[in-house]
Structures are given as structure tokens and as C-alpha cells.
Image: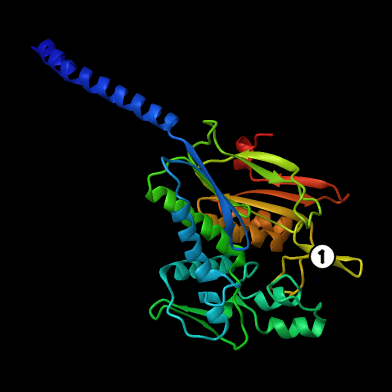
């Protein structure tokens, strides 16, 4: 009797397993046959690239998503939410803006102000913003510091408003908006059922699945050499990264020399001056690109030891840091969890 029951069970199980195997083979064949689309264009004053496996182009959907982010956070768009807030207008905030503003404030708190979206007046004063001015005097820096400070922002969730405590304060989301834009494009991919994709906006990336070579996505980390024209493409290393977001911040492309001294674009929100320490490049890997973007900028402010302390508190973050050692040579430090992802 027991044998009869087993035979009947097997009679049902075998066809089911065969159907499962056949279905799996058909899905794999379909995935292999489906082409990878390659898109590129301009977004947020830089280039974007998208590589994804899908039956048709999603460029229109991608650029619609990016235009929506630009309409919220661009400092170059006079009608953007940020521009309107910086003019002192009262604005009813969208879900997207509330999300990014809350994330920015959370990271400001976590990094003790190393990340600060109110740093715009200082960035502009040092000639890295959308208004180029003469180098500020120490008195001007001290005066501008009174107009900065993330603690002076009040994000009112019930009224959906962001209130700045002082007139003259300005917001700058440039260190988080590109990452958020990459997240937005990744959402477009997932909404269309895309399994394999890589999105990049000016060095901020989101990867999922596999590349056209049927391997994990290979992400190059650029060697930090003075390259204000962005012509050097020499790589420091290559990371095998998939199902993660990656952001890199560095001072080796956006800088200028004046009076024989180099001034980097990362401003320390506490001192009001460009940072002067050994970290040349910070690459952060985590689940969300906006988060990686903001923490990469934070590390450029915190320096090597400050970055290590930060990363000790955050198991969800991995980092690859390039810094100048005591002899002035490039050296590398990376999270232990990143070791098996380093390709070369």
C-alpha cells in the first residue's frame, strides 16, 4: 500500500519537475536572446549611461525620471524646488523632496555635520558653485558660516515644508541628487521588470544582475591624479559589484590653483575652508545610491581616521579609499568585506 502511494506521488512529481526544468531552460534562453540596450545622454550637468537587458529602449522613461529629479534639486534650474526655496519662497514639498531632505538631515546628524546641504554659500564663495566669485577673506568665511548649519533647517513633515532659520541660507543637494537620480532610474528598470542593468550618472551607479558578458558588473575606480579636464582614465582597481549602489567622491578633478596653492572643491562645513587632508578619493558601496553619494562626500570631509570610525558603525557600508601616505605616494584602504570583490 505504501509503495502504491509512492508510485502515485512520483507519477505527479515527475511531470511537474519536467515542466519546471523546461520552463527554466526557456527563461534562460529568452534572457540570453534578449538584447542589452545602451543609452546615454546629459543629466545634472554631467553624462548618464544605462546598460540594460530589455526588449526595447526605455530612454524616454529614463529621461522623464531624470527630468523629475532635475525639477526638484537643480541649482541651475530657476523653477526647481531648490531654487524656489533658495529665493525664500514657501513650497509644498513632493514625496521625493521630503525623502531626500530627510535622508540628508539623517546623514548630517550621523556624520556630525561633515555632510551638510546648507554649505552652498561657502561653495559659491570658493568658486565651485554656480556663481564664481573671488576667493573669500577669513572675515567673509566667518560671516558665511553664520548662514550655514544643517541644525538650522526644520523639515516639517505635517506641513510638507522645509524652513530655513535665517534669511540668506541656501540649499545645495549636489552631493546627494546624482545618487538619487541613479536610484530613480533603477526604479524605472525594476518597474519594467528589467533584471540586469547598470545605471551611471557622473560616476554614481546602481547595478543589478549581470552584464552583457554574463558576469557581475565590473566597476572601475579611477586613479586619483590631478585631472581637471577629465582626460585621464587610468584605473586604480576594478570591483566586481552587483545588486549594489556605488558612489565616488574625489578632489582630483574639481580643483584650481591660486597663489601656488591647490584648492579642492570639497568644503568642510565646520571650518568653511576647502578640506586639506590625505584622502584623495572615496568610493562607497551600499544598497541605495543617494546614501552612497552622501557618505562618499562625508568621508572626503572626515579624512582617513574619521572615515574608519564612521565605517565601524555601519556594517551596511563598504568603502574603498585612496589616500596619500606620509611619503606622498598613493595608498589604499578598503573595508574587509570588500576584499573578495576586488578584481585586480
| Quadrant of the rendered image containing residue 28 | top left
Where does residue 150 sit, x and y in percent of width and height?
Answer: 59, 76
| Residue 23 visible | yes
Q: In this view, does 337 lie above or below 251?
A: above
Residue found farthest to the bottom: 167
Q: Residue at x 52, y 60 (%)?
A: 180
Which residue in the protein does label 1 denote? 256
Badge 1 crowding class, 10 Å Cα cut-off, few under 14, some 14 to 19, many 20 or more, is: some
73 on left or right of 339? left
The quarter of the image holding the C terminus is top right
Secondary element at image label 1: strand
Residue found farthest to the right: 260
| Quadrant of the rendered image containing residue 117 | bottom right
Q: Which residue is drawn at 45% across and 49% down?
A: 58
| Residue 105 visible | no
The quarter of the image holding the N terminus is top left
Front-most of 200 and 11? Answer: 200
Where does residue 116 sit, x and y in percent of width and height?
Answer: 62, 71
133 on left or right of 16? right
Where does residue 113 sit, x and y in percent of width and height?
Answer: 63, 70
Which of the colour schemes (rainbow, by chain, secondary structure, one colour) is used?
rainbow
Q: Which residue is drawn at 65% across and 74% down?
A: 119
Where does residue 338 sit, x and y in percent of width and height?
Answer: 61, 41
Q: Is residue 332 above or below residue 135?
A: above
Amino acid at each position: 500500500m505504501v509503495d502504491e502511494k509512492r508510485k502515485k506521488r512520483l507519477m505527479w512529481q515527475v511531470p511537474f519537475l519536467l515542466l519546471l526544468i523546461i520552463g527554466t531552460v526557456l527563461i534562460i534562453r529568452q534572457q540570453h536572446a534578449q538584447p542589452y540596450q545602451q543609452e546615454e545622454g546629459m543629466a545634472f550637468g554631467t553624462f548618464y549611461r544605462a546598460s540594460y537587458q530589455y526588449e526595447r529602449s526605455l530612454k524616454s522613461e529614463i529621461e522623464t525620471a531624470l527630468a523629475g529629479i532635475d525639477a526638484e534639486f537643480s541649482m541651475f534650474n530657476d523653477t526647481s524646488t531648490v531654487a524656489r526655496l533658495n529665493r525664500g519662497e514657501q513650497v509644498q514639498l513632493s514625496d521625493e523632496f521630503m525623502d531626500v531632505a530627510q535622508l540628508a538631515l539623517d546623514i548630517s546628524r550621523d556624520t556630525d555635520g561633515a555632510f551638510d546641504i546648507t554649505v552652498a554659500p561657502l561653495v559659491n564663495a570658493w568658486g565651485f558653485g554656480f556663481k564664481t566669485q573671488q576667493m573669500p577673506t577669513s572675515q567673509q568665511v566667518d560671516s558665511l558660516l553664520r548662514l550655514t548649519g544643517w541644525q538650522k533647517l526644520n523639515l516639517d513633515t505635517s506641513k510638507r515644508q522645509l524652513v530655513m532659520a535665517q534669511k540668506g541660507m541656501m540649499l545645495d543637494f549636489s552631493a546627494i541628487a546624482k545618487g538619487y537620480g541613479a536610484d530613480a532610474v533603477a526604479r524605472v528598470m525594476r518597474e519594467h521588470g528589467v533584471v540586469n542593468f547598470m545605471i551611471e550618472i557622473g560616476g554614481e551607479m546602481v547595478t543589478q544582475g549581470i552584464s552583457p558578458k554574463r558576469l557581475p558588473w565590473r566597476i572601475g575606480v579611477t586613479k586619483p591624479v590631478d585631472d581637471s579636464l577629465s582626460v585621464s582614465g587610468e584605473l586604480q582597481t576594478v570591483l566586481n559589484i552587483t545588486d549594489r549602489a556605488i558612489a565616488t567622491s574625489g578632489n582630483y578633478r574639481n580643483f584650481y590653483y591660486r597663489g601656488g596653492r591647490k584648492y579642492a572643491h570639497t568644503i568642510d562645513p565646520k571650518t568653511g575652508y576647502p578640506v586639506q587632508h590625505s584622502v584623495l578619493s572615496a568610493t562607497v558601496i551600499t544598497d541605495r545610491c543617494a546614501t552612497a553619494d552622501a557618505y562618499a562626500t562625508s568621508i572626503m570631509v572626515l579624512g582617513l581616521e574619521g572615515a574608519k570610525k564612521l565605517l565601524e558603525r555601519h556594517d551596511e557600508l563598504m568603502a574603498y579609499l585612496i589616500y596619500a601616505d606620509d611619503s606622498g605616494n598613493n595608498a589604499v584602504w578598503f573595508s574587509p568585506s570588500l576584499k573578495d570583490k576586488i578584481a585586480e
